[in-house]
Image (cartoon, rainbow, N blue to C red):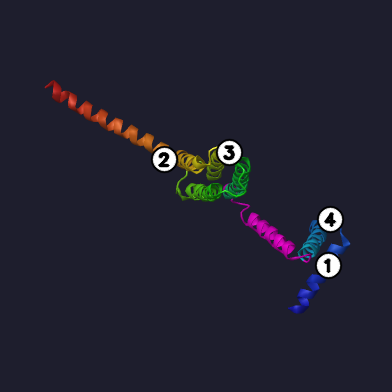
Amino acid sequence: MTARSASAALVALRRVLRQDGDDTWAVRLLPRAVFGLAAAYTLFVLASAGMSSFIAVCAVLLLVAALWLLRSRGQLLLALASTVVTVAITGYLAAVGDIARGAASGLLSGQAVFGYWALSGMAVLGAWMVRSHPGRRGVTVVIADVIMVMTAAAGTIVPSLSVPLGFTGVVAVLAVRGGGAAAVRRGVRRAKALVGRRLAAARPTDGQ
């Protein structure tokens, strides 16, 4: 079995080195192998530069692995990307609000940033907790994140109202996009239909 494996490996190596134009596998494999070795060597050199570089390389590899695993979950990938961007933007807007008010690090803005993080997680969980979501879940998270960015921008002027407004906006988006408004409309239609049937059934009795 070992001899067969070695023979198969030699045959594959010959195919790669020969680069026959009719051998599609060998033609595609050689540039991929070259670029893969170059990328691995580059990452090794960067990671060896220092602890911070090593941590950055590990973070990039974890991010690439996560993207690869989520390549077939487009809506979840969109939601996570939107959440990361929203957290960064809201943190930046909170810092801008501190600078505008002349405070290096305000307690109120710090609480607001934590509230934005909680709202971002709430938007993702709320979109995926609904068993039969009528729309695209990732789009729901993006809409909620846009509202949070708008409330964070308003929070640079009135920081005490930013998180309550963001909470109200996220809840409204989750209710409308998650089918809550449709359920309310269906309930109203059913109530109207029930009242109409009862009135129709009561009319002959009134006539008698």
Residue located beneath label 3 in the image: 153
Q: Report crowding for label 3: few under 14, some 14 to 19, many 20 or more residues within 10 A (C-alpha).
A: many
Are circles 3 and 4 on residues that touch, CB within 8 Å? Answer: no
- Say whether disc 2 or disc 1 marks the residue closer to the N-terminus: 1
Q: Nearer the viewer, mark 1 or mark 4?
A: 1
The disc label shown at residue 13, or none:
1
Looking at the rendered structure, the kind of residue marked 4 is Asp
Residue located beneath label 4 in the image: 22
Position of residue 161 in the picture relative to residue 69 (left or right): left
Q: Report crowding for label 2: few under 14, some 14 to 19, many 20 or more residues within 10 A (C-alpha).
A: some
- Say whether disc 3 or disc 1 marks the residue closer to the N-terminus: 1
Looking at the rendered structure, the kind of residue marked 1 is Leu
Q: Report crowding for label 4: few under 14, some 14 to 19, many 20 or more residues within 10 A (C-alpha).
A: few
Residue located beneath label 2 in the image: 180
Q: Residue at x 41, y 40 (%)?
A: 180
Query: Does the magenta portion include 54?
Result: yes
Position of residue 86 in the picture relative to residue 202 (left or right): right
Q: What x and y, as percent, mark residue 141?
A: 54, 44
Quadrant housing residue 23: bottom right
Q: Nearer the viewer, mark 3 or mark 4?
A: 3
Q: Residue at x 63, y 52 (%)?
A: 71
Count of numbered badges drawn on the protein: 4
Q: Going by the picture, which residue comes out furthest to the right?
A: 18
Q: CA distance from mark 3 to mark 2?
A: 28 Å
